[in-house]
Image (cartoon, rainbow, N blue to C red):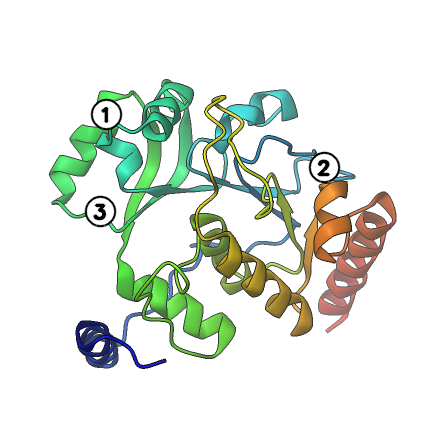
Amino acid sequence: MRLPRFEILTRIRRSVIYRILRPRAPSHPVGFTGPVVVLGSAPISTVPAGFNADFHVITVNGSQGVLDAWGIYVPDATFMQFNQVEGQTTNALHVRKVLNGKRTRLLYVVRWPKNLEQLEQGIAAFNYGYDDLKLINRFKRMAMYEAVMGGLNVEIDDNMKFSNGITAVFYAILSGARAVIISGINPDSSGHIYNDANLKRLHAGTDKQILQALIDRGYPLYTADDEVAKISGIPLWTHETFHKFSAGVATTTRGATLR
């Protein structure tokens, strides 16, 4: 089917700007050494087998609200959609309520349309703390997609857009994670853990396609949620998986020491 003229022009414009800017895909300041948990806001999330202080945690929007029960109070990084800062939607209001008084080490705000000072004021208004604050614009997201998937995604419509949960998965991979465990990320579910509005999950189709592509390409992606493993084919992170990972890390460390 032929694309409308404005979509063709938008695709060309974004592709040209991207190639001119050549943005670097964001990655963590320090490489991840332990398993990385990407925690989303689906109504059901599961503490990964073997979870301990060696695991790294990346939260998405308001998913940090469940971390207290895990014994973790400050995630390594948080990805927040720009609308969560000042938006008046049901979802945005509940995200700010959940995050009030909490903090993260590194906060990424995705596609913030205003200046940095306004962002800092907006975050301060709901008493959310961070050690460092960074912005991710459309072109940096494109760079993350290209670095992992090997192609260009200009996000013309909802069929091409992917969620912040997938952005966080890309980030973990680009930061050297040898195991990425998703929890509370279920494209087939609706609703969020921090409210009972049962809102439809955006970009579910694209997310499913990307997750499947990551598995097919051999990326070390797992899920902690049994139901997600059953319906998606993503390998379940079990105690056996954890012990194999730990043994592999120990072997690598000993080899590096001997060299």
Q: In the rendered image, is residue 74 in sight?
A: no
Residue 124 is marked as: 1
Residue 12: where, in percent of width, then height?
A: 22, 80
User: In the depicted view, which residue is nearer to us: 13 or 46?
Assistant: 13
Disc 2 element: loop
Residue 32 sits above or below residue 149 on the image: above
Position in image of residue 15 (x %, y %): 25, 78
Q: CA distance from mark 3 to mark 1?
A: 15 Å
Q: Position of residue 142 (x, y in %)?
A: 35, 68
> What's the amino acid at mark 2?
Phe
Foreground: disc 3 or disc 2: 3
Q: CA distance from mark 3 to mark 2?
A: 33 Å
Q: Residues within 10 Å of mark 3 (few under 14, many from 20)?
A: some
Q: Position of residue 237 (x, y in %)?
A: 77, 48
Q: Residue at x 85, y 44 (%)?
A: 239
Which residue position is annotated with label 2?
Answer: 51
Name the residue carrying label 3.
112
Type of the residue with mark 3: Trp
In the rendered structure, which amino acid carries the disc numbered 1? Ala
